[in-house]
């Protein structure tokens, strides 16, 4: 690794944020596509389940970060 290069690694906060954005995008974009008629056989509740599942999987990261923050003080 040269002097100008930085070691890049994924942080838990970053992954959690990306998962929240992705889940919200699935719900929002999927709802718009359903409204426009692209997703004719898809129900809104199915889109919500997928989007919130993505957010929920990484929600434990936020809980762990919160617990760690309070355990340090």
Image: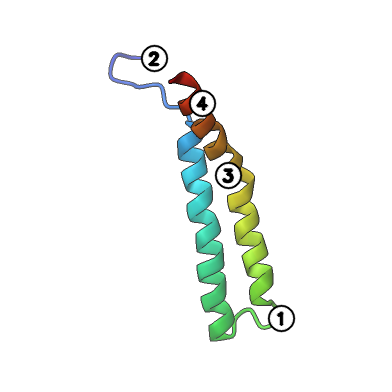
Determine the secondary structure under disc 1. loop
Mark 4 or mark 2: whose residue is earlier in sequence: 2
Q: Residue at x 33, y 21 (%)?
A: 5
Q: Give the farthest residue toward the right.
A: 41
Where 63 falls versus 28 (above or below)? above
Q: What residue is shown with label 4?
A: 68
* As drawn, 52 above or below 66: below
Mark positioned earlier in the residue sequence (1 or 3): 1
Q: Residue 50 in the image: x percent, y percent?
A: 66, 61
Q: Which residue is mark 2?
A: 1
Estimate the x, y position of residue 20 in percent, counting from the top left: 51, 51
> Observer-nearest residue: 73 or 60?
73
- In three-dimensional space, the C-alpha distance between marks 3 and 4, rounded to whole angstroms, equals 14 Å
Q: Earlier in the sequence, mark 3 or mark 2?
A: 2
Mark 2 Cα-neighbour bin, 10 Å: few <14, some 14–19, many ≥20 = few
Whichever of callouts 2 and 1 sits on the residue coming sooner in the sequence is: 2
Measure how far apart labels 4 and 2 are at the Cα level.
32 Å
Badges 2 and 1: C-beta atoms under 8 Å apart?
Answer: no
Discs 1/3, front: 3
Q: CA distance from mark 3 to mark 2?
A: 34 Å
Identify the disc placed on residue 41: 1
The C terminus appears in which quarter of the rendering? top left
Q: Quadrant of the N terminus?
A: top left
Mark 2 vs mark 1, foreground winner is 1
Specify the label residue 59 is tagged with: 3
* Picture residue at 60% right of the left edge, 60% below the top: 51
Q: Answer above or below: position of 16 versus 53.
A: above
């Amino acid at each position: 690794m040269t002097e100008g290069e930085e070691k890049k690694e994924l942080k838990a906060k970053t992954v959690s944020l990306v998962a929240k954005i992705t889940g919200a995008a699935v719900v929002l974009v999927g709802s718009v596509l359903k409204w426009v008629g692209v997703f004719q056989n898809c129900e809104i509740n199915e889109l919500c389940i997928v989007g919130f599942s993505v957010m929920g999987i990484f929600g434990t990261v936020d809980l762990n970060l919160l617990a760690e923050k309070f355990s340090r003080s």
